[in-house]
Amino acid sequence: MKRRIISPYENAPANQFKGNLHTHTTDSDGPLSPQDTVDAYDRRGYDFLMISDHDTVTDIASLDARNMTLLSGNEITSNGMHLLHVNAGGKIDPSPERQQVINAVNQSGGFVIVNHPNWGEDFVHCSQEAIEKLTGFVGMEIYNGVSLRVEGGALATERWDMLLSKGRRVWGFGNDDPHIPEDYGVAWNMVFAEGRRTSQLIEAMRSGCFYVSTGVRIDAIEAEGRRLRIRSADTECFRVYRDHGRMLTSEEGRELNYELPDCDPLTYVRVECHGFGARMAWTQPFFVE
Ligand SMILES: [Zn+2]
Ligand SMILES: [Zn+2]
């Protein structure tokens, strides 16, 4: 069978930019003022930050970005499942019809990420059915930092696998969603881009040219034909998953050099890089044609 990997990292620039897209400040229920929040992330060495208060678009032009790129955003909260509005030109009406919200965001030049699917005492902020009904969103939080210490689950890779297995092309994002300062720096996105201008970061994230990290850095990702190579000095074990969350292989080492087998279904693979302690990285899915 002739199979070929379609990599979102094809021709990826070597530069990696670290950023958090889901950030609360005193403009809603976060711990610090917008400027103090920017300063806190800047001190942690972040390259970009999006302040995303609940139903509030913070005016980033009034802030000193320090050494970062600030993206405009908000968390569409009222009336339904929480949606991250990335690259916001202004506030979008938080209609209970979330498809209308997504359409309006897309028309305005932004994009949508479905937030923390597994937040809540029943581990269901939004049902899988509700997510599957929606179209036009770019990504889903596969890791939501605050959900580590509050009720529910931080990780949502099983929701992601279910969507991907249905042929949906959705990127995984990792964000802090901080409500106290201890929530800073839990999970972030590493974006491959030539530079960190807003347009470069947005374009890279739209096309899946980034990975999620809780402390593992991926040094290089290459795909050729049906072979996948990943180098990561921080990684102790690579795990490759395919449709419906089936694990294809688990290999210890700092380099993965893996040829896709002949098996069905095999519409995508994704790689988890397990490092020291709880540190991990998640690649985006590589679709298989
Ligand atoms: Zn939320
Ligand atoms: Zn939030």
Image (tube, grey):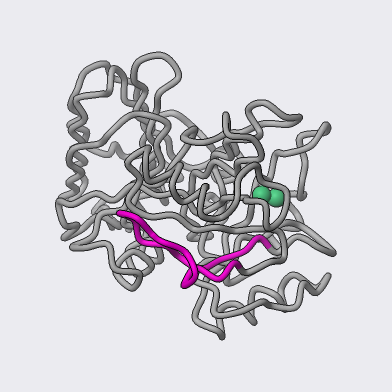
Residue extending furthest toward the bottom: 107
The image quarter containing residue 76 is bottom right
Q: Is residue 270 left or right of residue 67?
A: right
Residue 32 visible? The answer is yes
- Nearer-the-camera pick, 138 or 263: 138
286 falls in the magenta region: no
Which stretch appears magenta? 58-75
Q: Is residue 94 left or right of residue 157?
A: right
Q: Residue at x 21, y 46 (%)?
A: 226
> Where does the C terminus fall, quadrant-wise?
bottom left
Q: Residue at x 41, y 42 (%)?
A: 212
The image quarter containing residue 248 is top left
- Nearer-the-camera pick, 270 or 65: 65
Q: Residue at x 18, y 27 (%)?
A: 255
Where does the image place residue 115, in percent across and percent down from the top left? 64, 51
The image quarter containing residue 261 is top left
Where does the image place residue 200, in percent across and percent down from the top left? 29, 68
Q: Residue at x 66, y 40 (%)?
A: 179
Residue 167 visible? The answer is no
59 falls in the magenta region: yes
- Give the total of numbered labels: 0
| Residue 191 sits above or below residue 158 on the image | below
Where does the image place residue 235, in percent across and percent down from the top left? 27, 23
Where does the image place residue 176, in percent across and percent down from the top left? 54, 41
- Nearer-the-camera pick, 136 or 94: 94
| Residue 40 sits above or below residue 267 on the image | above
